[in-house]
Image (spheres, rainbow, N blue to C red):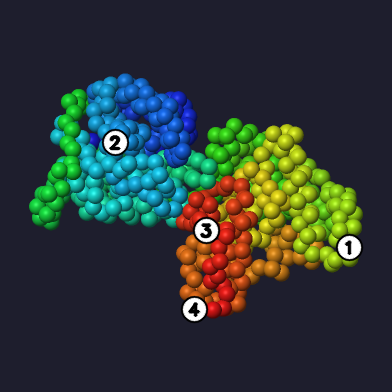
């Protein structure tokens, strides 16, 4: 065997839907046989879906996952090896990869490195493995690893390639997306391949799971770190690539460093399992061409991530229709466009709720957007309701001046209307707030924050504008009216109100927020970068004093390196004050 044909089954599994996940796996096994694939790999924990979280505490959940693996194994012929992610059990549970051949489970690899940072919490659930695994058949050798294992220069992948002479390092993964991660991940894989003089096949999960998005983009790189195949982003895909085993052997013969490293690492041989498989290769395989999908641009990538995250949250929870409050502003416009791309126009309703301070242009822009998207459009004025509130509160408010209380009553009336429509018609309310607003608390609890899913929860305002421009570029026509881009952002809860009355200009605000929220830079570290100290202290105070609001926000898709919620976990009750003068 001079060439190894690898298939990467990039599928969208659903947490807990073991039966449905098995169906998808079997479909891809059949496809792999059609192309005479030698080795087919599926994502990490593909049988259970990822991450299963506290479902792992349920005894019957573990049992069903093991029975499913036994069922899958029966469909794997002697001429193919399948590597499938599942939950293994032996006095404890493990994040594991099963190696299947000829109708049975021939080997199991247990994840060595368990991530416990950011959105990961694997120490809570799993015991770590302590062995590397190489599968040997014909004259080919494959090392198996799971997700985090490949991110370390040493560890199981190094043992497999160096001491186990693995030609291919096969990594099954469920790696959550954030903007920019694709290039970062591909650089890492290229370095691992070149350092080990081994090809790498990396299969990644695709789809949305609560707040996480998995971007796919499965990959095969050769021993020099060159990409030979790349799958699609944000879509299910089946990637096939032929790996030249002779080229790998030749590269190793010409590298004296490998001989020296083998001697240095020789004591690690006790951590290596080598399993020989009586494999029957198919000689006359159909011709294929290694396919390299072009990566999306930065903005297109984020947009597709938001659409996928929204679609899967709704679809996997059995939600068919959504409702959105259309203010005539850019946030609600972008949210509506994403919803239409996720569900289709027939499943989206936009609601305009004009109040005493709503501008004519906002009402016109909301209506035009709905027309451009061809969605159902409702107009429900709030003036009379608002006046009734004010009248009822007059005996208590007395002659106190108009302030944020009267402003927020309007926002909360709109929230009540949207939730009433939700209850009556079964439409999920999509909130429209962005990360700049939730960071600073520039949002109304039980008002514009009321809803079931926050599409722009992790999207800064400046990126909202970029994504909105992309919507029009993608459509090659004006979907979001041009005036929406040009007018100053405003909540329109009092006369002449604009966001910049209380917030710094968004380009300035967002750069400070990124430094303070995502990079954890202190006020004293941010100011020397060219920022006004008073402004930085004000922003830091707004962020810190709004934690209680963020805890009550709807879930939303993560697209930045550090999102609120699972990523950034600060206590609400907290007396640490970076923004105070010491």
Q: Residue at x 62, y 50 (%)?
A: 553
- Residue 510 vertical position relative to residue 68 in the rendered view, above or below: below
Q: CA distance from mark 1 to mark 4?
A: 47 Å
Which of the image's four quarters has the C terminus?
Answer: bottom right
Q: Position of residue 273 (x, y in %)?
A: 18, 38
Q: Is residue 227 visible?
A: no
Q: Residue at x 61, y 63 (%)?
A: 545
Mark 4 surroundings: few (<14), some (14-19) or many (≥20) residues within 10 A: few
43 horizontally vs 387: left or right: left
In the picture of the structure, the residue carrying the numbered disc 2 is 6
Instruction: Give the secondary structure at mark 3.
Output: loop
376 horizontally vs 547: left or right: right
Viewer-closest of 310 and 334? 310
Instruction: Give the secondary structure at mark 2.
Output: strand
Q: CA distance from mark 2 to mark 1?
A: 75 Å
> Mark 3 vs mark 2: which is more N-terminal?
2
Mark 3 surroundings: few (<14), some (14-19) or many (≥20) residues within 10 A: few
In the picture of the structure, the residue carrying the numbered disc 4 is 528
The answer to whether mark 3 and mark 2 are in CB contact below 8 A is no
Q: CA distance from mark 3 to mark 2?
A: 44 Å
Indicate which disc residue 421 carries. none
- Residue 492 vertical position relative to residue 132 in the rendered view, above or below: below
Indicate which disc residue 398 carries. 1
Q: Residue at x 81, y 57 (%)?
A: 358
């Amino acid at each position: 065997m001079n060439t190894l044909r690898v298939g990467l089954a990039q599928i969208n599994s659903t947490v807990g839907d073991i039966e449905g996940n098995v169906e998808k796996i079997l479909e891809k096994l059949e496809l792999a046989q059609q192309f005479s694939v030698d080795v087919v790999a599926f994502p990490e924990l593909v049988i259970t879906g990822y991450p299963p979280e506290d479902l792992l505490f349920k005894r019957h959940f573990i049992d069903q996952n093991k029975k499913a693996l036994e069922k899958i194994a029966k469909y794997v012929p002697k001429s193919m090896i399948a590597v499938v992610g599942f939950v293994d059990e032996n006095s404890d549970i493990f994040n594991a990869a099963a190696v299947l051949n000829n109708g049975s489970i021939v080997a199991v690899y247990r994840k060595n490195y368990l991530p416990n940072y950011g959105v990961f919490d694997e120490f809570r659930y799993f015991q770590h493995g302590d062995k590397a695994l190489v599968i040997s058949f014909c004259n080919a050798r494959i090392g198996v690893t799971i997700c985090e294992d490949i991110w370390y220069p040493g560890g199981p992948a190094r043992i497999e390639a160096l001491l186990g002479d693995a030609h291919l390092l096969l990594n099954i993964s469920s790696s959550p997306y954030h903007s920019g991660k694709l290039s970062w991940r591909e650089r890492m894989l290229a370095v691992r391949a070149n350092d080990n003089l081994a090809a790498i096949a990396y299969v990644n999960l695709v789809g949305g799971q609560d707040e996480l998005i998995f971007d796919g983009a499965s990959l095969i790189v050769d021993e020099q770190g060159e990409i030979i195949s790349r799958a699609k982003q944000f879509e299910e895909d089946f990637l096939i690539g032929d790996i030249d085993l002779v080229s790998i052997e030749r590269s190793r013969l010409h590298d004296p460093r490998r001989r020296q490293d083998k001697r240095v690492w020789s004591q690690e041989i006790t951590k290596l399992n080598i399993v020989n498989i009586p494999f029957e290769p198919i000689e006359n395989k159909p011709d294929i061409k290694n396919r390299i999908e072009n990566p999306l641009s930065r903005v297109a990538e984020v947009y597709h991530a938001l659409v996928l995250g929204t679609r899967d949250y709704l679809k996997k929870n059995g939600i068919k229709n959504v409702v959105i409050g259309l203010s005539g502003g850019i946030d609600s416009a972008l949210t509506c466009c994403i919803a239409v791309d996720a569900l289709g126009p027939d499943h989206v309703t936009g609601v305009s709720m004009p109040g005493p301070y709503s501008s004519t242009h906002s009402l016109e822009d909301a209506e035009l957007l709905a027309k451009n998207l061809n969605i159902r459009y409702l107009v429900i004025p709030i003036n009379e309701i608002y006046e009734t509130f004010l009248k009822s509160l007059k005996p208590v408010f007395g002659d106190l001046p108009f302030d944020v209380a009267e402003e927020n009553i309007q926002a909360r009336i709109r929230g009540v209307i949207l939730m009433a429509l939700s209850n009556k018609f079964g439409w999920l309310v999509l909130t429209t707030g962005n990360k700049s607003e939730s960071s600073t608390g520039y949002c109304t609890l039980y008002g514009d924050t009321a809803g079931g899913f926050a599409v722009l929860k992790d999207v800064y305002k400046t990126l909202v504008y970029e994504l909105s421009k992309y919507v029009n570029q993608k459509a090659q026509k004006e979907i979001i009216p041009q005036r929406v881009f040009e007018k100053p952002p405003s909540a329109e809860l009092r006369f002449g109100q604009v966001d910049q009355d209380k917030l710094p200009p968004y380009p300035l605000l967002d750069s400070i927020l990124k430094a303070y929220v995502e990079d954890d830079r202190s006020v004293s570290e941010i100011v020397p970068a060219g920022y006004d100290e008073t402004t930085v202290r004000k922003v830091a105070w707004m962020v810190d004093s709004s934690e209680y609001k963020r805890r009550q926000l709807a879930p939303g898709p993560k697209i930045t390196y550090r999102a609120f919620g699972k990523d950034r976990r600060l206590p609400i009750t907290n007396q640490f004050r970076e923004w105070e003068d010491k």
